[in-house]
Amino acid sequence: RIDGEKGAEKLLEDGFNAVFLAPGLWKAGVLNPEQKPVEGLYSSVEYLSSLRDGRLEETAAKFDGKTVAVIGGGAVAMDCVETAVRLGTKDVYLVYRRSYLQMPAEDGEVRSALEAGVHFLLLNQPLDYVVTNNQISGMKITRTRLGAPDDSERRSPENIPGSDWTLEADIIIEAIGNQAEADSSNWYPSVETDAKNLIKANSETGATSADGIFAGGDIVRGPALVVNAVRDGKVAAQAIQQYLNK
């Protein structure tokens, strides 16, 4: 593991000639940072991990016959809604603040979710949660319309005044992106990072601002596809080989 203060630099001090950083983004984005833990509220990481680490039966028992809402419109959100359908849920809703054509998920993933019976609630912005006796019982939502393009060249969603409503739900999964751990830059302080704690690396080599330290994957790109991370690894491997042969 590369963690702890100066974790990457310590590997170089211990005799390694190069280090490749690919820790990914494991901190899940949240709707309300002030939200206290409640039953029925999951991050996408927590939920999907539970299906693979021996807790499948336990998770299935909690989801069986329940109404589930997933927030998001990307590939991870599609994974969440489709797996939730297979757990014997009563209804599964996908709540997304933009339009169908603006969803970042692949077309095939979106169609697959629709065919699985997922209810798409588009142009709807989640605001907060309804909690009853420390248990999720719904989600406060407002309808949106598309305004001017933002930095990503997608039209920004604007809340429509007076359109607030409540979706009843027993379980809510937040699939609204992942981010770098707040202290991740401390693991490699000699490496230049940006305001989001993403590592700045040369796209052609994976080289960072620190000699002998390379990086790739989501920690450089932000949330992206596995194939992009694989490419980054291959590119960096070639660059590292050239670096070692100097």
Image (cartoon, rainbow, N blue to C red):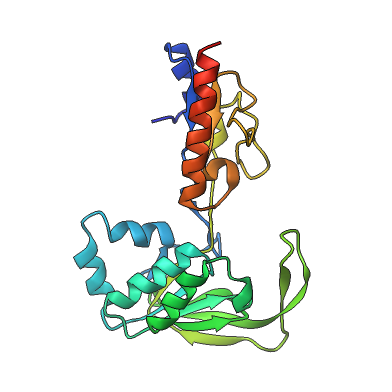
Q: Quadrant of the N terminus?
A: top left
Q: Residue at x 48, y 24 (%)?
A: 19
Q: Residue at x 52, y 65 (%)?
A: 74
- The answer, for residue 17, to whether it is visible in the render is yes
Residue 53 placement, left or right of 30: left
Using the image as rendered, state which of residue 121 and residue 241 is in the foreground.
241
Using the image as rendered, state which of residue 117 and residue 4 is in the foreground.
117
Where, by quadrant of the figure, is residue 86 drawn? Answer: bottom left
Instruction: Measuring from the top left, give residue 50's x and y in whole percent.
Output: 29, 59
Q: Is residue 243 above or below residue 111?
A: above
Instruction: Measuring from the top left, give residue 181's x and y in whole percent.
Output: 52, 43
Q: Is residue 231 above or below residue 236?
A: below
Q: Residue at x 43, y 29 (%)?
A: 2
Q: Residue at x 48, y 35 (%)?
A: 234
Q: Is residue 221 above or below residue 29?
A: above
Using the image as rendered, state which of residue 101 and residue 60 is in the foreground.
101
- The answer, for residue 6, to whether it is visible in the render is no
